[in-house]
Image: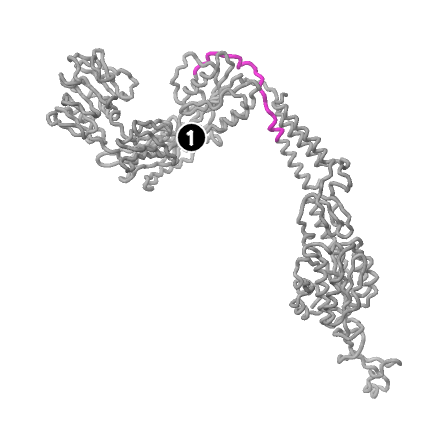
């Protein structure tokens, strides 16, 4: 047996003090009573005329000495040696992501994981250390290499759940970074296994063995996985997806309301594993619409979804072309574009347009605004070199966000201007012969296409309108994107021209001030709900919204993963061998003390 | 100094009378039926004349018819001899309101009821021994003198009920009221028994303070006997408090049973009861006053 706080044995001085108090006579106030005959003869201190008296047996004295003794025994913190597999440095990665808020184990998966980690902390020996990492959309070290049991317990209890995903790669990278070379270490992951796929390969393996402790038992859950508002020329409608991720058939009540009030209440029946898409009406005056289901399941974060219903302010876009139906149709897909199409001869100036697309035409002076230049005429400022024959095309960087969902596999270009010498910007789409599409951020977001659209089969591919969509969104980002974001996902906010203040009001009412001069990235999106962006322009406050919803099939799936795919360990140090840990027994001793105190109280009231 | 009993209390007391169950024999004429035959409008009986009888009582009409001397007897109306024994020991000098003070007022009230009915009142206060309250009082005009006399006795000392036996048994048959808390160095039972032996109709009125009925303190204390000054250390816990209440209830019950066994009335009064409530309600309920 080991004593973790042997100095506390000094408290044993209380025991002789208690005995001394029994030697001492109590100083009692005098009370005159009519007659002593009626008073029972249950008197603790017999008459004595000296300050000391003979010590007599008393149950109270015995119990008080026992209480003091037991409390001293608890204070020295005795610990029993126990053979454990804890390493000298234990790394605990605790999943604090959204799915850990599920209540299939009471009170929640996160609390269950904390309950399982608690005994590990208590087993740490005097020389052992523990690092606690909270795994959310980012990983964070909560306590690093500490041997202080109380401090680790406090840090563990202070870990709050987030609404975002769990980034396992970041957590493992962080853990690998804090382990010193040759250190006897071992990592434990307490998670339901619902984590983002590993991004890092960990080709050399992890510098510690790692154990996965599954938390959670059930995947029964009905949740909302998407909610979007579509605006067409005729009407507006919302499209909602309700998904039963469990095995059992469920019927839920759907409450559909706008910021003006309740719109509809309907019952939705779903068999096991079934998803159902619903089209729901959106009132003209609505700014936001909210769907809520009373799923009465173990997970509440996906029971509510909000979408922004207000139509974004339209952009005026000018297409200057001798005739290009492909470009025109692709641009008209944007419902927030007011597209004007004119012939080159009619072009005067484009100052009132947010964006201009020049097709096979170059104005005398390029506008100081976003533009797309397609196949500039020879001799113009942006024209390239002589035409060269092209075959297949490819992306310069397949991961470029501007090429999201754009497939270039079957795209061919007959010929193009030679843009190799162009200093316009970086190449987005290229070929063996020459870059084909160049983009630049400064002074404005602008695009140069070296070939005539008609000299390519690209307009016939699905990737073409997608590329036009991507480029136009990049060039004319909405001031506040009205789509739904995931928790912890950064939101790009472009302040209105002339905005003097930009403030984001979070769903809990807290306010965040943003810089007004440049594009701002707002990352405090950990709460679910509607965020309002208030911009003051010319003394008037303009308000727009974006929503943050869980909307994650992976999270709502909720079924805990039995085997988590983890990188292999590079080393198998001594952690596999027996290691002396400690089992603290003082809480049990303190419990005995509590029982004794109750007995002492009872004995006092019984007049013993 | 405030009067022992306020005028409005006295006015109400005048409407009451001490209730006796059997006829009484006093020394002077009063408003009570006497066991003696005397002069009064109410005829009682005839008896033969014996020498020495008052010849004025011979019924001459009967002599004419019967040719022998017959005395015509009438019910004599005599005063009630009422004795009030008031405990002014140290145990009575206790409580809020003070029991001794309330006992003085109570004795004064009962005495006033009797005086208003032309009854004869004898006052005796006692503690360690009895102290005569002076010559018997008679008539309403003697009330103030009696009140002053009651107030003149200080409270204190131990209670010795055994020393009450002799003065009680010396009394002529009549009415006796014993006002006490029943707490003392000797038991009260001999005094109560003596009341029966002296053919006293009467009542035992036990007067307690509210603080001794329900204790208002807990914890450690040095208890001091108000009568003897003896001290004892004590710790009041719920258990010991319950034991005290049981002992007090047992003592009260013993006094009540002894009194009733000897044909006496019994009432327990608390010193926080208004004097009018004690007289008008409690004493009427037990049949002492009417």
Instruction: Determine if residue A552 is in view.
Output: no
Specify the quadrant of the image occupied by residue B126: bottom right
Give the answer, above or below, for where B281 lies relative to B71: above
Residue found farthest to the left:
A345
B210 is within the stretch colored magenta = no
The disc numbered 1 marks a residue on which chain? A
Q: Residue at x 66, y 57 (%)?
A: B272
Q: Residue at x 74, y 48 (%)?
A: B224
Q: Nearer the viewer, residue B191 or B113?
A: B113
| Disc 1 secondary structure class | loop
**Left or right side of A417 for A506:** right
Residue found farthest to the right:
B51
Numbered range of the magenta stretch: A567-590
Q: Residue at x 32, y 39 (%)?
A: A258
Residue at which label 1 appears: A220
Instruction: Determine if residue A504 is in view.
Output: yes
**Left or right side of B96 for B258:** right
Q: Nearer the viewer, residue A10 or A296?
A: A10
A569 is within the stretch colored magenta = yes
Specify the quadrant of the image occupied by residue A5: top right
Q: Position of residue A24 (x, y in %)?
A: 73, 37
**Left or right side of A275 for A23:** right
């Amino acid at each position: 047996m080991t004593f973790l706080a042997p100095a506390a044995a000094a408290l044993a001085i209380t025991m002789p003090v208690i005995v001394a108090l029994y030697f001492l006579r109590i100083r009692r106030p005098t009370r005159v009573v009519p007659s002593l005959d009626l008073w029972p003869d249950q008197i603790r201190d017999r008459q004595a005329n000296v300050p000391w008296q003979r010590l007599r047996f008393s149950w109270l004295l015995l119990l008080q000495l026992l209480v003091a003794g037991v409390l001293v025994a608890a204070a020295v913190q005795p610990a029993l040696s126990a053979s454990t597999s804890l390493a000298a440095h234990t790394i605990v990665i605790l999943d604090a992501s959204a799915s850990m808020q599920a209540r299939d184990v009471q009170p929640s998966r996160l609390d269950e994981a904390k309950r399982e980690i608690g005994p590990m902390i208590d087993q740490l020996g005097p020389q052992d250390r523990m690092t606690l990492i909270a795994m959310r959309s980012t990983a964070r070290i909560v306590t690093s290499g500490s041997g202080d049991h109380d401090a680790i317990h406090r840090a563990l209890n202070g870990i709050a759940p987030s609404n975002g995903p769990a980034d396992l790669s970041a957590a493992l990278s962080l853990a690998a970074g804090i382990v010193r070379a040759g250190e006897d270490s071992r990592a434990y992951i307490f998670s339901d296994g619902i984590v983002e796929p590993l991004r890092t390969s960990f080709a050399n393996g992890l510098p510690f063995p790692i154990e996965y402790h599954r938390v959670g038992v059930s995947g029964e859950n009905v949740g909302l996985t998407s909610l979007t508002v579509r605006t067409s020329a005729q009407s507006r409608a919302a499209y909602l997806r309700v998904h039963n991720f469990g095995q059992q058939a469920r019927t839920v009540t759907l409450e559909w309301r706008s910021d003006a009030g309740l719109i509809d209440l309907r019952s939705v029946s779903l068999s096991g594993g079934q998803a159902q898409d619903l089209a729901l009406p959106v009132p003209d005056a609505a700014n936001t619409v909210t769907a809520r289901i009373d799923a009465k399941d173990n997970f509440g974060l996906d029971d509510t979804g909000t979408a922004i219903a207000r139509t974004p302010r339209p952009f005026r876009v000018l297409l200057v072309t001798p005739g290009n139906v492909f470009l025109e149709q692709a641009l008209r897909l944007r419902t927030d574009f007011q597209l004007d199409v004119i012939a080159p001869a009619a072009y005067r100036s484009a100052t009132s347009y947010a964006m201009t697309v020049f097709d096979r035409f170059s104005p005398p002076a390029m506008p100081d605004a976003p533009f797309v230049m397609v196949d500039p005429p020879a001799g113009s400022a942006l024209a390239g070199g002589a035409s060269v024959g092209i075959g297949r095309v490819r992306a310069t960087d397949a991961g470029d966000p501007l090429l999201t969902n754009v497939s270039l596999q079957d795209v061919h270009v007959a010929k193009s201007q030679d843009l190799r010498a162009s200093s316009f910007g970086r190449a987005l789409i290229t070929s063996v012969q020459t870059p084909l599409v160049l983009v630049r951020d400064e002074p404005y977001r602008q695009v140069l296409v070296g070939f005539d659209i008609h000299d390519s089969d690209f307009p016939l591919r699905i990737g073409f309108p997608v590329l036009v969509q991507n480029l136009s969104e990049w060039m004319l980002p909405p001031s506040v994107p009205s789509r739904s974001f995931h928790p912890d996902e950064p939101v790009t906010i472009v302040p209105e021209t002339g905005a003097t203040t930009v403030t984001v009001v979070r769903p809990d009412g807290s306010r965040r001030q943003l810089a007004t001069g440049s594009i701002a990235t707002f990352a405090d999106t950990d709460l679910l709900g509607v965020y309002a962006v208030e911009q003051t322009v010319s003394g008037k406050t303009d308000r727009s919204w974006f929503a943050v919803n869980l909307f994650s099939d992976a999270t709502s799936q909720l079924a805990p993963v039995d085997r988590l795919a983890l990188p292999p360990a590079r080393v198998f140090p001594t952690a596999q061998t027996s290691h002396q840990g400690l089992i603290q027994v003082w809480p049990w001793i303190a419990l005995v003390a509590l029982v004794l105190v109750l007995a002492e109280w009872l004995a006092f009231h019984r007049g013993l | 100094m405030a009067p022992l009993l306020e005028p409005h209390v006295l006015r109400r007391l005048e409407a009451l009378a001490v209730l006796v169950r059997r006829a009484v024999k006093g020394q002077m004429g009063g408003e009570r039926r006497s066991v003696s035959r005397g002069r009064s409008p109410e005829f009682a009986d005839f008896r033969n004349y014996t020498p020495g009888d008052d010849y004025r009582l011979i019924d001459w009409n009967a002599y004419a018819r019967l040719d022998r001397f017959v005395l015509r007897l009438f019910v004599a109306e005599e005063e009630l001899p009422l004795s009030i024994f008031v405990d002014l020991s140290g145990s009575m000098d206790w409580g809020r309101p003070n029991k001794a003070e309330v006992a003085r007022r109570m004795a004064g009230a009962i005495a006033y009821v009797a005086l208003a009915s032309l009854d004869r009142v004898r006052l005796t206060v006692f503690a360690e021994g009895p102290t005569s309250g002076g010559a018997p009082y008679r008539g309403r005009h003697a009330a103030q003198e009696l009140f002053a006399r009651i107030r003149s006795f200080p409270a204190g000392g131990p209670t010795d009920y055994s020393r009450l036996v002799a003065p009680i048994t010396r009394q002529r048959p009549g009415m006796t009221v014993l006002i006490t808390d029943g707490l003392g160095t000797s038991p009260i039972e001999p005094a109560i028994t003596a009341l029966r032996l002296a053919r006293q109709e009467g009542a035992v009125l036990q007067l307690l303070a509210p603080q001794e009925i329900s204790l208002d303190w807990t914890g450690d204390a040095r208890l001091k006997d108000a009568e003897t000054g003896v001290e004892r250390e004590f710790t009041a816990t719920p258990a010991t408090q319950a034991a005290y209440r049981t002992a007090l209830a047992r003592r009260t019950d013993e006094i009540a049973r002894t009194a009733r066994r000897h044909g006496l009335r019994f009432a327990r009064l608390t010193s926080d009861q208004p004097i009018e409530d004690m007289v008008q309600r409690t004493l009427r309920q037990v049949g002492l006053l009417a």
